[in-house]
């Protein structure tokens, strides 16, 4: 059993194996010896330690994982050894001899990363960074920005500001090497640092010569640095605000989902409740409700959990990311949940893909001249209401049997040339095929009675719960001979389906009336007269009826000449006022 040691590299803590720690210490000591007496040796060591810390972070999957000796050997192979300096050979006698060759090949395969080159900037270093990334001199990038702004193509200024905000600056030696595509190893870090040191020394020597040449550049850089700081501050505040909103929304959703999962249907999730029974009536998958709830929790909850982590990262910049194992696990669970819900949804849809009907037809002894009374009936064990409503309810019969109850019934009255009337009851339902839909329709229980020219219709129907809810409904059509008089009770009004020829049956404010059945129309025999005022430009016509059927042949607006049938009379009610009034009375 090996001991572990906690170390800190460039502000990042690591758990490292004791053997690996000893080897790392010898490795760093060797580098210090090779750099002893060199200018900026401490800064070079800081960059080297920072790079080693980056490589360790890439090797481990979680903060608690221990850095092993194998991990260290891989890091040393990337960083290389200080072989160009006088180092005790015994210190690294256990290091693989192929590290230099590996470093070279690794360096040739390095890829550039996009950074802002703040050392060669005029405004923000975006152009210089892009130049390094694509291998073009920065002057051409700057000219391209100017041309785009002058040409007014797109929004180059907005794009530039976004790049300024989103692209990180190359501050460390490691970043600068990544920006130019050079391998980040000891020799390159030292070389890059010395180049920077030499550049500073040259600038100090030539300060008097370059002072005026760089004055404009320095002033522009200072102005845009200040502007950039203001923009960055505002952007950071905005990002923090967005992070807070994301955390509030995602956390609230997650809490709601968890609470809803454990209280699904009732306080006792595992018990039976009315809402779960309703869902069971609609569900066709025969999958336990808790499993559907669990799949829904994962399918909806995992994206909001990811949003919650994103919100935290916006607020806490150095927050450790989730390990690859956790990410893969979340993706797999979420994908399986979505696939499971999709499969259940498809199965649910196919169970209601087909329509079926079952028709019952029965003659009723009603002839021309007879009066038929129609009334809807409610069963008090189910409901006292006598009105049409869509949807379903769960009810108990007298013997405490659970049934599906619905009042989704349409009532139509039509004329027929037959000598006697008839009633046609069409039961409808949905199913996974036509035969299944027909069987479910046939299973609908509906009753009516006819006695002494009185038709008593149930205002509801029932079906067994085993038939499930499949949009069951009933359409009743009563065919009556022409000349029959029908008296629908007030409680039938809400059940009528729309029929333009017989619209009068439901147009009388729920009042019962006698109607004579004519060919494709009805005639009300006891409807009250209502006054309707029709205003023209300078006249008013008062008609004492709700309707006029072919009574007025022509009305000439200029001379107000009216030709009417027998029974109509034209009266002038006022001739001295500026507004003329005519009254037409229907006897």
Image (spheres, helix red, strand yellow):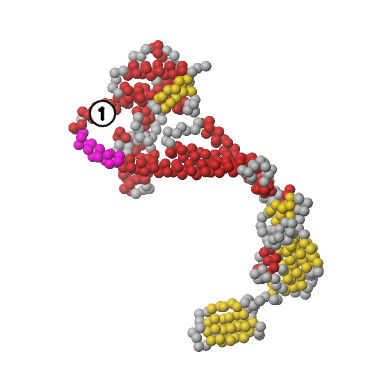
As drawn, the residue found furthest toward the left would be 208
Q: Position of residue 515 (x, y in %)?
A: 71, 73
Highlighted range, magenta: 209-226
Q: Residue at x 32, y 37 (%)?
A: 125
**In the picture shown, does residue 188 fall above or below 210?**
above
Q: Main secondary structure of the magenta part?
A: helix
**Quarter in which the C terminus is drawn:** bottom right
Horizontal side, residue 204 vs residue 1: left or right: left
Horizontal side, residue 104 vs residue 293: left or right: left
Camera sees residue 417: no
As drawn, the residue found furthest toward the front would be 267
Q: Position of residue 138 (x, y in %)?
A: 31, 37
**In the picture shown, does residue 162 fall above or below 27?**
below
**In the picture shown, does residue 373 fall above or below 385?**
below
Disc 1 on helix, strand or loop? Answer: helix
Q: Residue at x 68, y 44 (%)?
A: 272
The residue wearing badge 1 is 200
Horizontal side, residue 85 vs residue 271: left or right: left
């Amino acid at each position: 059993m090996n001991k572990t040691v906690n170390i800190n590299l460039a502000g990042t803590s690591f758990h490292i194996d004791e053997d690996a720690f000893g080897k790392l210490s010898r490795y760093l000591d060797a580098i210090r010896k090779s750099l002893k007496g060199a200018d900026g040796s401490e800064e070079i060591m800081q960059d080297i330690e920072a790079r080693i810390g980056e490589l360790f972070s890439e090797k481990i999957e979680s903060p608690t994982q221990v850095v092993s000796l194998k991990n260290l050997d891989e890091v040393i192979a990337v960083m290389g050894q200080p072989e160009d300096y006088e180092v005790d050979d015994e210190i690294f006698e256990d290091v693989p001899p192929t590290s230099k060759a590996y470093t070279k090949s690794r360096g040739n395969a390095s890829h550039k990363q996009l950074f802002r080159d703040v050392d060669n900037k005029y405004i923000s270093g975006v152009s210089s960074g892009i130049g390094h990334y694509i291998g073009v001199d920065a002057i051409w990038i700057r000219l391209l920005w100017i041309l785009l702004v002058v040409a007014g193509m797109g929004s180059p200024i907005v794009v530039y500001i976004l790049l300024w905000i989103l692209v990180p600056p190359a501050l460390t030696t490691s970043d600068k090497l990544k920006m130019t595509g050079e391998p980040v190893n000891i020799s390159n870090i030292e070389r890059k640092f010395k180049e920077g040191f030499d550049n500073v020394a040259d600038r100090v020597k030539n300060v008097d010569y370059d002072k005026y040449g760089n004055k404009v550049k320095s002033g522009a850089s200072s102005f845009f640095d200040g502007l950039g700081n203001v923009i960055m501050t505002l952007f950071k505040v905005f990002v923090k605000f967005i992070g807070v909103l994301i955390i509030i929304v995602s956390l609230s959703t997650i809490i709601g989902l968890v609470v809803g999962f454990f209280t699904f249907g009732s306080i006792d999730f595992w018990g039976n409740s009315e809402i779960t029974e309703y869902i069971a009536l609609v569900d066709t998958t025969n999958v336990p409700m808790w499993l559907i709830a669990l799949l829904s929790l994962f399918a909806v909850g995992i994206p909001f959990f990811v949003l919650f982590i994103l919100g935290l990262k916006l607020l806490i910049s150095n927050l450790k990311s989730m390990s690859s194992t956790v990410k893969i696990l979340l993706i797999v669970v979420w994908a399986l949940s979505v696939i499971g819900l999709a499969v259940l949804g498809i199965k649910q849809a196919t169970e209601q893909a087909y329509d079926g009907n079952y028709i019952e037809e029965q003659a009723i002894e009603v002839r021309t001249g007879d009066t038929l009374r129609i009334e809807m009936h409610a069963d008090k064990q189910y409901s006292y209401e006598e009105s049409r409503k869509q949807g379903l309810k769960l009810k108990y019969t007298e013997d405490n049997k659970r049934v599906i109850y619905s009042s989704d019934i349409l009532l139509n009255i039509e004329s027929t040339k037959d000598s006697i009337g008839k009633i046609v009851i069409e039961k409808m339902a949905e199913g996974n095929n036509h035969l299944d839909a027909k069987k479910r329709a046939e299973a609908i229980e509906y009753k009516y009675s006819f006695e002494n020219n009185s038709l008593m219709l149930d205002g509801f129907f029932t079906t067994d719960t085993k038939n499930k809810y499949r949009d069951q409904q009933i359409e009743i059509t009563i065919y009556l001979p022409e000349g029959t008089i029908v008296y629908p009770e007030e409680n039938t009004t809400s059940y009528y389906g729309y029929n333009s020829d017989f619209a009068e049956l439901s147009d009388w404010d729920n009042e019962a009336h006698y109607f004579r059945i004519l060919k494709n129309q009805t005639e009300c025999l006891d409807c009250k007269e209502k006054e309707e005022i029709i205003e023209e430009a300078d006249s008013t016509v008062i008609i004492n009826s709700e309707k006029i059927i072919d009574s007025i042949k022509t009305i000439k607006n200029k001379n107000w000449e009216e030709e009417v049938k027998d029974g109509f009379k034209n009266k002038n009610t006022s001739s001295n006022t500026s507004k003329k009034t005519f009254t037409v009375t229907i006897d």
